[in-house]
Image (cartoon, rainbow, N blue to C red):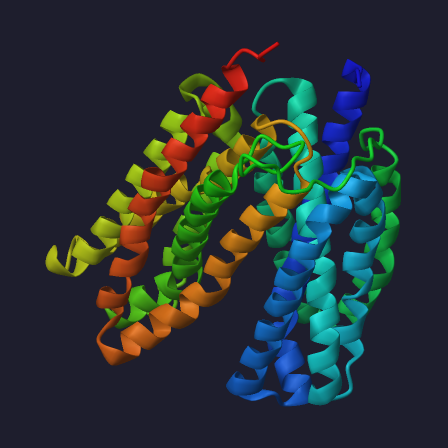
């Protein structure tokens, strides 16, 4: 199907909007967790259970969404999933107790997972239409949307208003904001569900299961390293570097700012370096960043904070391009992207889900610096597994089609 320049530009605006709104909803939810905990008197264990149920629901729906995208088109699934993912926020917002919250948390997670796969699949199709890297900036706007949601929650609480009311209003208003964006998406091109091909590929897709596994492992490693920074950077600054309690959160802030900045600027970088060199550089920088973090306590009292923050910045710079490069590689394979993208996304989400918990167990058994060796090693795995998979896909995409 031929897509005009005007259609591609409108669709790009729509995908920017989808990523921003999805990030905004997550920012509201994350920033509102303390208020939800106070309202229902959850405590750490039950709150952790809620978060696990959300992640489980998202992971399950991701695997189901892939075939739906291939059959119905990403446009059709985006039409449904965008408004739905915001509307299901209403359930946890009004849950009267923990049993209700547990059930509604699964529903919330299901909505998040469907939107995650659908909008990423459509972003791959828009990049195909453009013929040049544009995916990284979408993920950057997701981060900006999350920051906006957190900032709005802070303003509402500072004004003496209720965070629950904010969540309810957002659950009713945000779905309406998705509707004009959905009209700008690329025209729907429904496909047929792919069956296993004799040569180990998915019919209609350029991705073999072996390549999916390599890309999935790279996504898993990158997400786990990212999750380690999100959950443990501030605690490392406080516990290991003995920083002031007010300064400790700046460790994560440095990481987040570096990651968001590079995601917004990452497309020209990939266009210049190519996907293979970009993911190799990403793994190298992230590994170097974690090495600096681990070495920070050894550098002396005057340099250790600067060394650690430099390390978190390098980790953020490196990990910023991992997901966009991998998703773009899935699109470069040609054919329907739903199933393959859902599998790779599920791999990555698993890393984000289990990583922080595993690091916590290791830190409890030994120490936090010992636990952070795991994301340092996995940062190198990003380059070791992602580069050969992308190189194979590039060779397949440029190979002549046999008569």
Q: Residue at x 50, y 14 (%)?
A: 399
Q: Residue at x 25, y 43 (%)?
A: 288
Front-most of residues 116 and 397: 397
Front-most of residues 116 and 301: 116
Residue 380 coordinates in the image, percent (x, y):
29, 44
Q: Is 67 rendered above or below residue 327?
A: below
| Image quadrant occupied by the N terminus | top right
Quarter of the image for residue 92 reads bottom right
Quarter of the image for residue 153 reads bottom right
Residue 185 coordinates in the image, percent (x, y):
81, 33
Q: Is 100 rendered above or below residue 162?
A: below
How many circles with numbers are drawn on the protein? 0
Q: Which residue appears farthest toward the front when viewing the image?
A: 198
Q: Is residue 382 left or right of residue 193?
A: left
Q: Is residue 62 left or right of residue 223?
A: right
Residue 98 visible from this viewpoint: yes
Residue 255 coordinates in the image, percent (x, y):
40, 50
Q: Is 400 rendered above or below residue 33?
A: above
Q: Residue at x 46, y 66 (%)?
A: 354
Residue 21 visible from this viewpoint: no
Q: Is residue 149 left or right of residue 246?
A: right
Front-most of residues 34 and 247: 34
Residue 189 coordinates in the image, percent (x, y):
82, 31
| Image quadrant occupied by the C terminus | top right
Quarter of the image for residue 337 reads top right
Q: Residue at x 42, y 34 (%)?
A: 389
């Amino acid at each position: 199907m031929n897509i005009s320049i005007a259609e591609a530009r409108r669709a790009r605006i729509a995908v920017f909007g989808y990523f921003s709104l999805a990030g905004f909803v997550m920012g509201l939810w994350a920033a509102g967790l303390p208020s939800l905990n106070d309202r229902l008197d959850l405590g750490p264990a039950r709150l952790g259970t809620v978060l696990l149920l959300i992640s489980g629901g998202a992971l399950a729906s991701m695997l189901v969404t892939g075939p739906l995208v291939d059959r119905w088109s990403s446009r059709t699934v985006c039409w449904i999933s965008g408004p739905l993912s915001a509307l299901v926020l209403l359930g946890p917002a009004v849950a009267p107790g923990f049993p209700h919250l547990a059930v509604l948390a699964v529903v919330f997670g299901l909505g998040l997972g469907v939107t995650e796969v659908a909008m990423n699949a459509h972003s791959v199709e828009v990049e195909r239409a453009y013929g040049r890297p544009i995916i990284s900036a979408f993920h950057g706007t997701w981060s900006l949307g999350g920051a906006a949601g957190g900032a709005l929650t802070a303003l509402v609480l500072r004004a003496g208003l209720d965070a629950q009311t904010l969540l309810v209003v957002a659950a009713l208003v945000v779905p309406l904001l998705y509707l004009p964006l959905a009209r700008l998406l690329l025209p729907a091109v429904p496909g047929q569900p792919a069956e296993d091909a004799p040569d180990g590929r998915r019919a209609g897709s350029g991705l073999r299961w072996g390549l999916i596994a390599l890309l999935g492992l790279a996504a898993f490693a990158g997400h786990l390293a990212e999750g380690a920074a999100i959950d443990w950077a501030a605690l490392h600054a406080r516990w290991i570097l003995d920083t002031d309690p007010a300064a400790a959160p700046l460790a994560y802030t440095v990481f987040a700012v570096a990651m968001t900045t590079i995601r917004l600027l990452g497309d020209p970088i990939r266009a210049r370096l190519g996907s293979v060199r970009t993911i190799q550089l990403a793994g190298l920088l992230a590994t170097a960043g974690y090495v600096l973090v681990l070495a920070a306590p050894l550098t002396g009292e005057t340099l250790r904070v600067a060394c650690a923050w430099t390390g978190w910045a390098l980790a953020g710079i490196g990990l910023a391009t991992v997901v966009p490069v991998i998703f773009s590689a899935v699109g470069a394979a040609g054919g329907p992207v739903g199933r393959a993208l859902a599998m790779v996304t599920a791999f990555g989400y698993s890393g984000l889900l289990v990583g922080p918990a595993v690091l916590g167990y290791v830190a409890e058994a030994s120490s936090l610096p010992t636990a952070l060796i795991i994301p340092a090693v996995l940062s190198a795995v990003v380059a070791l597994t992602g580069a050969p998979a992308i190189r194979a896909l590039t060779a397949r995409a440029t190979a002549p089609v046999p008569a």
